[in-house]
């Protein structure tokens, strides 16, 4: 749940400010990775 919130927050900030820094992209990818792994662990 926290990973989803952080990913959405970073995405909104980058869209509003029109700035795409590499660290923001890395954090967004990391957050979606965490969401995916949590889904896999809950499924099994």
Image (cartoon, rainbow, N blue to C red):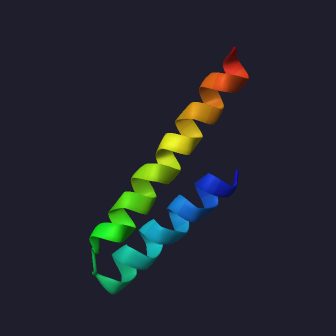
Q: Position of residue 14 (x, y in %)?
A: 37, 75
Q: Is 44 above or below relative to 17?
A: above
Identity of the residue drawn at 46% across and 51% down: 30
Q: Quadrant of the C terminus?
A: top right
Q: Which is nearer the eye, 16 or 21?
A: 21
Q: Which is nearer the eye, 27 or 43?
A: 27
Identity of the residue drawn at 61% across and 24% down: 40
Q: Position of residue 22 (x, y in %)?
A: 28, 68
Q: Which quadrant of the view contains residue 37?
A: top right
Q: Position of residue 33 (x, y in %)?
A: 48, 42
Q: Hey, which residue is sitting farthest top in the picture? A: 44
Query: Is 16 left, or right, of 37 in this rendering?
Result: left
Identity of the residue drawn at 70% across and 50% down: 1
Q: Is 21 above or below relative to 5?
A: below
Query: Is 16 left, or right, of 43 in this rendering?
Result: left
Q: Is 10 above or below relative to 35?
A: below
Total marks placed: 0
Q: Position of residue 6 (x, y in %)?
A: 58, 64
């Amino acid at each position: 749940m926290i990973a989803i919130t952080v990913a959405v927050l970073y995405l909104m900030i980058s869209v509003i400010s029109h700035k795409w820094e590499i660290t923001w992209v890395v954090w967004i990818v990391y957050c979606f990775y965490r969401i995916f792994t949590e889904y896999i662990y809950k499924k099994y």
